[in-house]
């Protein structure tokens, strides 16, 4: 399998995955539900991420653990990173950055993220 390249709406952010993900995660937490984020996960060292970003750390969590990133120009949510310093063993990339056919055969896992919120 070749690398997959996805982009935000304006094309200024480009994220390259090294291969197809094992699964696509649909989370129902309030942030994923409102932004439409669907996660695919890779190690920091496996991803190529280019672009200019704004970031957001949730203020509604008692112990935030992620920084959410979005394109500085079009506002599309692109990926998240842990609040810890890199390298990261796991990062989330928005599966919606990729053409629908690119991930159509990947299993979908539904996660009850609303139960994690505090």
Image: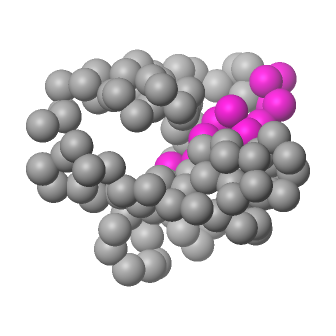
Is 63 inside the magenta-drawn segment? no
Identify the image quadrant of residue 45: bottom right
Q: Which span of residues is magenta-colored?
A: 92-102
Q: Residue 49's spot in the image, x, y percent?
A: 70, 65
Residue drawn at x 54%, y 68% is 44
Q: Is residue 43 left or right of residue 88?
A: right
Identify the image quadrant of residue 40: top right
Q: Is residue 106 above or below residue 98?
A: above
Residue drawn at x 47%, y 26% is 34
In terms of depth relative to the viewer, which is nearer, 105 or 82?
82
For the question of whether residue 77 can be seen, the reply is yes
In terms of depth relative to the viewer, which is nearer, 44 or 30?
30
Residue drawn at x 61%, y 52% is 70
For the question of whether residue 1 can be seen, the reply is no
Q: Is residue 111 left or right of residue 76?
A: left
Which quarter of the rendered picture does the N terminus lie within? top right
Q: Residue 88's spot in the image, x, y percent?
A: 43, 70
In terms of depth relative to the viewer, which is nearer, 69 or 45?
69
Q: Is residue 30 left or right of residue 32?
A: left
In terms of depth relative to the viewer, which is nearer, 109 or 76?
76
Q: Is residue 101 above or below residue 67?
A: above
Residue drawn at x 40%, y 26% is 27
Identify the image quadrant of residue 22: top right
Is 95 inside the magenta-drawn segment? yes
């Amino acid at each position: 399998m070749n690398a997959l390249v996805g982009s935000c709406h304006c094309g200024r952010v480009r994220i390259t995955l090294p291969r197809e993900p094992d699964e696509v995660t649909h989370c129902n937490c309030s942030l994923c539900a409102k932004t439409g984020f669907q996660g695919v996960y890779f190690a920091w060292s496996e991803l190529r991420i280019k672009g200019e970003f704004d970031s957001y750390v949730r203020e509604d969590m008692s112990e935030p653990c992620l920084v959410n990133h979005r394109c500085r120009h079009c506002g599309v949510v692109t990926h998240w990173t842990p609040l810890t310093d890199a390298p990261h063993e796991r990062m989330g990339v928005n599966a919606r950055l990729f053409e629908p056919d690119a991930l159509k055969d990947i299993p979908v896992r539904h996660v009850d993220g609303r139960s994690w919120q505090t």
